[in-house]
Each structure stands twice: as C-alpha cells, then as structure tokens.
Image (spheres, helix red, strand yellow):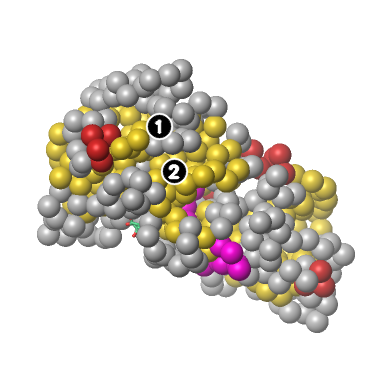
C-alpha cells in the first residue's frame, strides 16, 4: 500500500489495511508515540477485534507496526481500552531497560497486558484473567496516574441501572479497588480521565465517546462536578461510525501536553476503513457557564508545511476570489475576517471548487444565522477566525482559539480540475484582515 489512494488521509492516520475504529492505549513511551486502535485486519467492516499498532516520533509521521493484541494469542474480548507507561515500575513487570507499556482491555471486567519491548509484543498478565470482575455490562477501561496520591486511577464504562463509569484505584496496575461511581445519563463508552490546568490550577476532566465532558475535582476516591453539565467538546457527528467518536488522550507526553485523537468512521477506500482525527492539544478556558475545552492542532504540523501564500487587508466579494489559481488537496488555511463594516450575509471558503461554480464542501460563516459550518458560533468581538485542515477525505474546522472545532469526513474529488479554492462573500462584502494558505506534504514515508 502506498497510501496514495483517493480519500486516504495524507496527514490523518489510517490503518495501512483493514478496518479501524477507536484509538486505544495512546502513550508516549521510550521515545515514541504509540497509537493502538480497534482493528479488523481481515476485512473492511467491524469484526474480530484486534489491537492494531502504529508509532510516530512526532505525532505526525506514523509507521504501521504489526498487530499488538490478537484473538487466540491474547485471551479475552479485545475491545477498547487505555494504556500507560509504567515509568516507576510500580507493577514490577519491567524486565529490561525499557519502560513497560501496560494496556487494559476486555469486557465485563478488565484484563492486563504488558510489553517490555516498546510495544513489539504483549504478554497477558496472569494468563489474561480478569483483574477486575464486573457482572454488569461494561467495557473500555482507561487508566491515568494520580500524581497527588501516587496511585493509578481507572475509569470503566458500566451499565449499572444506567450509564456512568466505575472508578477504581491501584498502587501497582494489577490489584484494583473499587473507589466510587460517577453516574451520568448519557452513553459513557470510552471514558477518558485526565488533568488540565485552568488558569494554572489543575482540574480533572472526564470525557465520553460521544464527546460530552465534565470538569471537576478528584479527591483520590470520588470525582465531583459542581456546574450544570455536560458540555459538548466537538461538533462532529458523535456516534459510532460518525466523524468524531471515542477520543483518547496520550499518557506520559514529554512536555505534559494533553494530546487527543479520535476515530472518524465516515471514510473508506479499497483497502481500509476509518481514520483518526489530527492530534490536538487540549486546554481549558473559563466561561460564564464553567470551564470549556479548547482543541488546537499540535504544532508538529509544522513539519509538513510546504509552500505558503499570504494575504492582507483584502475586500472579499462574490466575484473577487483571492485564492484563484491555487490547486491543492492537502492544505491548511487560516483566515481572519473583520465584521465591522461587513455587508455580506455570509462568507467563507468553497473547497475543491471547480470552474463551473460547484464545490465539494463549503465552510461558511452565516452572519444572519450566527453559524459557522452549520453550527452555532460566537465570533470573538468583531472578528471571525477560521482554521481549516483539508485532507483527501477529512476536513477539520477550528475557530475561536480552539473553542469551536468540527471534525468531518468528506470524500473530496481528487481530479486536479476539482482542486480549486474559492473565498467568497455573498450579498455584500467583508474585509479579510489576513489569510494564509499552506500546502501540507504527505506524512507517509
Ligand atoms: C466504541 C466501542 C467500544 C468498544 C469498541 C469495540 O466504538 O463500541 O465501546 O469497546 O467499540 O470495537
């Protein structure tokens, strides 16, 4: 496989072949980012879940690795789960010079698997026996280090008379004690628990597969929130097979960033199905209705930047297209518009536009409806800013310092004549403060 097929993300991770769904066990270990994922190597549909594996030095350039967890070789139901790096060898599982990677999977209970060769091979701890038994329907264990109490904390989705997560704690990743339950009235597949600073003060954040999140505190036993919640992290379509689902964050990033990737299920080619969102660094900002998550593409994107063009102080109309003449299929656009003096009812970018006026997708700010890309949107003062990541089968829209983000799958037409970009204003004009177009080269080696 050359990764050159139409619709194949050039800077969005996809499995070299077969089906992928949820990201699993994201860790930075022994100098590499590890991306594991729900994987069927035998077909293009969901079936016989394995854990696929890829590594990257920089979150951008991924190398496909052999399967990490395989039914028949590794016992249990190898559904989604998290992973951590056991840097302090709390488990005693370390045998060599490398930090062990420990991952968690199975349903109706939790099994532990570990690797002492940086993810090349995984052993089942205790023969794969469940170290936690959960009689109710449950799955998707995920683990985080609680630095204040020097303990591990696990969240597991379980259906105990309703949705929610069970919280367990452990000193050593192997013996777990039930600590508490966080009950919630929304589907809590793939919970992810992590710490993010808000104005310098650490907050505990709990997210679910559907991208709802709650911000609160954790005292070592109980997770508490004090505001009317949850909030929605992302306005992609959040259901299995949608364009944003089952996000997980990396454990042990070298600089402490919380970096998140999610599953996009709306894209397939002849040899693969599904891809991951481009990694984003998460942040928290205060707002009248409580802390909100911001999502910002990781700066490592820089390594793909090729030729750049910039614009400054340009009036956009229905007929004057500053982007005329550019043909591209993998690129980034940033642009800032001035709402003062704007008369256009709507303005935006038509992507993969053609000379006959058609385009594959339009990203529009509608001044009258107050929407961006069809979603409710709050400009920052008099300014509308957008940042677009356009790939062959993926479109990500960011704005407002990361408070607005949408991940989408679009099967962009690969023909050169369909690779135009049209910046437009309808029903009047708007002033473009500045804009930048950057071609992104492929991340596949
Ligand atoms: C979410 C999910 C998880 C489960 C996995 C199975 O997409 O249903 O809850 O562990 O997929 O592949």
In what quadrant of the picture does the N terminus appear? bottom right
58, above or below 428, in the image:
above
At horizontal 18% and vertical 57% (from top left) the residue drawn is: 137
At horizontal 58% and vertical 38% (from top left) the residue drawn is: 56
Q: Nearer the viewer, residue 169 or 130?
A: 130
C-beta proximity under 8 Å, tags 1 and 2:
yes
174, above or below 142, in the image:
above
- For marks 1 and 2, the one nearer the N-term is 2
Magenta stretch bounds: 260-272
Question: What residue would you read off at disc 1?
Answer: 115
Q: Quick one: SS at disc 2?
A: strand
For the image shown, how many numbered marks are present on the structure? Answer: 2
Q: Position of residue 86 (x, y in %)?
A: 37, 26
Q: Position of residue 334 (x, y in %)?
A: 69, 52
In what quadrant of the picture does the C terminus appear? top right
Q: Quadrant of ligand 1?
A: bottom left
| Label 1 environment density (alpha carbons within 10 Å; few <14, some 14–19, many ≥20) | many
Q: Position of residue 277 (x, y in %)?
A: 54, 53
225, above or below 359, in the image:
above
Residue 403 appears in view: yes
Residue 296 appears in view: no
Q: Nearer the viewer, residue 367 or 36?
A: 36
- Distance CA(mark 1)–CA(mark 2): 9 Å
Q: Quick one: SS at disc 1?
A: strand
At horizontal 30% and vertical 28% (from top left) the residue drawn is: 146
Q: Nearer the viewer, residue 100 or 248?
A: 100
107, above or below 344, in the image:
above
Q: Which mark is residue 68?
A: 2
Which quadrant of the figure has residue 320?
Answer: bottom right
């Amino acid at each position: 496989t050359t990764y050159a097929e139409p619709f194949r993300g050039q800077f969005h991770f996809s499995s070299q072949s077969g089906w992928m769904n949820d990201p699993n066990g994201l860790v930075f270990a022994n100098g590499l980012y590890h991306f594991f994922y729900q994987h069927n190597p035998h077909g293009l549909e969901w079936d016989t879940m394995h854990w696929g594996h890829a590594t990257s030095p920089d979150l951008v350039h991924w190398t496909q690795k052999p399967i990490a967890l395989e039914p028949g070789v590794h016992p249990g139901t190898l559904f989604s789960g998290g992973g951590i790096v056991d840097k302090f060898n709390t488990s005693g599982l370390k045998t060599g010079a490398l930090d062990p990677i420990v991952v968690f999977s199975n349903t109706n209970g939790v099994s532990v698997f570990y690797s002492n060769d940086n993810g090349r091979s995984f052993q089942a701890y205790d023969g794969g026996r469940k170290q936690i038994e959960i009689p109710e329907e449950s799955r998707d264990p995920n683990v985080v280090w609680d630095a204040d109490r020097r303990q591990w904390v696990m969240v597991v989705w379980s259906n105990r008379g309703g949705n929610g997560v069970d919280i367990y704690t452990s000193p050593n990743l192997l013996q777990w004690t039930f600590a508490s339950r966080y009950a919630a009235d929304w589907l809590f597949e793939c919970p992810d628990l992590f710490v993010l600073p808000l104005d310098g003060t650490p907050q505990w954040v709990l997210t679910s597969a559907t991208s709802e999140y709650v911000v609160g505190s954790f005292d070592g036993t109980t997770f508490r929130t004090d505001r009317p919640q949850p909030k929605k992290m992302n306005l992609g379509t959040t259901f299995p097979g949608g364009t944003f689902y089952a996000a997980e964050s990396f454990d042990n990033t070298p600089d402490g960033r919380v970096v998140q990737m999610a599953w996009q299920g709306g894209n397939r080619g002849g040899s693969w199905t599904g891809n991951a969102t481009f990694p984003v660094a998460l942040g928290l900002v205060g707002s009248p209705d409580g802390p909100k998550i911001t999502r910002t593409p990781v700066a490592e994107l820089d390594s793909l930047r090729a030729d750049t063009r910039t614009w400054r102080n340009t009036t956009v109309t229905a007929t004057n297209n500053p982007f005329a003449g550019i043909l591209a299929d993998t690129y980034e656009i940033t642009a800032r518009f001035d709402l003062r003096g704007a008369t256009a009812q709507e303005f935006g970018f038509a992507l993969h536009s053609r000379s006959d006026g058609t385009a594959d997708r339009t990203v529009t700010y509608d001044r009258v409806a107050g929407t961006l890309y069809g979603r409710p949107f709050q400009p920052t003062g008099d300014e509308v800013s957008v940042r677009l990541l356009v790939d062959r089968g993926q479109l990500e829209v960011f704005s407002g310092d990361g408070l607005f983000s949408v991940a989408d799958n679009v099967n962009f037409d690969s023909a050169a004549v369909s690779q135009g970009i049209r910046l437009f204003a309808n029903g009047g004009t708007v002033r473009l403060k500045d804009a930048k177009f950057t071609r992104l080269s492929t991340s596949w080696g």
